[in-house]
Image (spheres, helix red, strand yellow):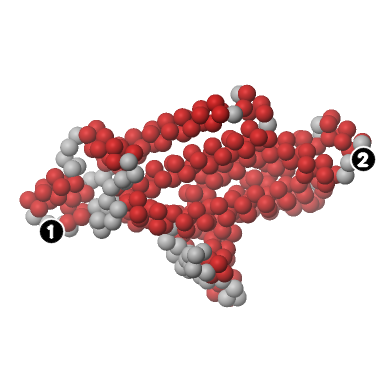
Amino acid sequence: MLGFIIRRVISGVILVFTISIIAFTLLYLGGGDIARRILGENAPAETVARKVQELGIDRPLVVQYWDWLSSAIGGNLGRSWFNGEMVSASVSNRLSVTVSLVIGAIVLSAIVSILLGVLAARRGGWIDGLVQLVSVIGFAIPNFLIALFLVVVFAINLHWFKATGFVPLTKSANGWLASVTLPIVALSLAAIASVSQQIRSAVVDTMSRDYVRTLRARGIGINRVIYQHVLRNAGGPALAVLALQFVGLLGGSVVIEQVFALPGIGQLTVQATTLGDIPVVMGVVITAAIIVVIVNLVIDLAQAALNPKVRLS
């Protein structure tokens, strides 16, 4: 198992390093006249030239990347070009909001998907068809439309939740729950549609195995067979899809945070991209890459625990 973890960690480090090179190159080559954008269109040429030298963007791209990488390894992601705030502080202050949304959506997606997938696999018939129809509809509707619908119905008309804003968990647990419930629901519906179909297919396939029929012949109840044996074997493919959904949820949070005016990483990304604040964008990209690598490592470990063949491969 230790060798398995080491291989995954090494591959994750290589992935983050590769992403940093690609992102840095694309951002700096497509950044345009950053200095004039910071100072304004009417800034004198001499002032713009001094700003370019101050930012260090007049140096070769390789030298700029090496300086950034050296600082990033030490935990210093630089400062925003527009407000001078440390990038690491900007990202960490907003990370809890996005993590709350994504983890909440993952947990909700996993629970609902298991229930729907098992129900469709066990009952079949019209229930199976209904679950699949609902899944297709949930997958087809964009999450921002779902978010707007939830805001209109549950926030504006019924006044059950706040339409916008975020309350930290440390300030008020009830306020935090009220501020993240609608965004989590809007973010998770597409994931539920995808994962529930995967679980349904995996459960149907596993239920046809010989060992399941043997367990049933020994008088073991169907619920015990499904939740203790079938889901363990069907969990591998579902975990793989859930890992992919995590990446999608991380990207989808950008739109959801805009709809609900949540001060998360998605909102920071939109603001930094609009301004051309490259250090902030790089900080967000690397943070997201590290999170994805960690989540994939956790999923790999979970799959290895469920299926020893994964460790051998």
Rendered position, 311 above or below 241: above
Q: Is residue 255 visible?
A: no
Q: How many marks?
A: 2
Q: Please name the amino acid that badge 1 sits on.
A: Asn
Rendered position, 15 above or below 174: above
Q: Percent from the top left, x then y, of residue 24?
A: 31, 39
Relative to 37, is 87 on the left or the right?
right
Residue that appears at 59% across and 70% down? 154
Relative to 70, is 238 on the left or the right?
right
Relative to 6, is 223 on the left or the right?
right
Q: Percent from the top left, x then y, of residue 9?
A: 48, 32
Name the foreground residue: 111 vs 125.
111
Residue that appears at 63% across and 28% down? 310
Q: Is residue 100 visible?
A: yes
Residue ID for mark 1: 42
Q: Secondary structure at mark 2?
A: loop
Q: Please name the amino acid that badge 2 sits on.
A: Gly
Residue ID for mark 2: 219
Name the foreground residue: 57 vs 296.
296
Q: Percent from the top left, x then y, of residue 196?
A: 68, 47
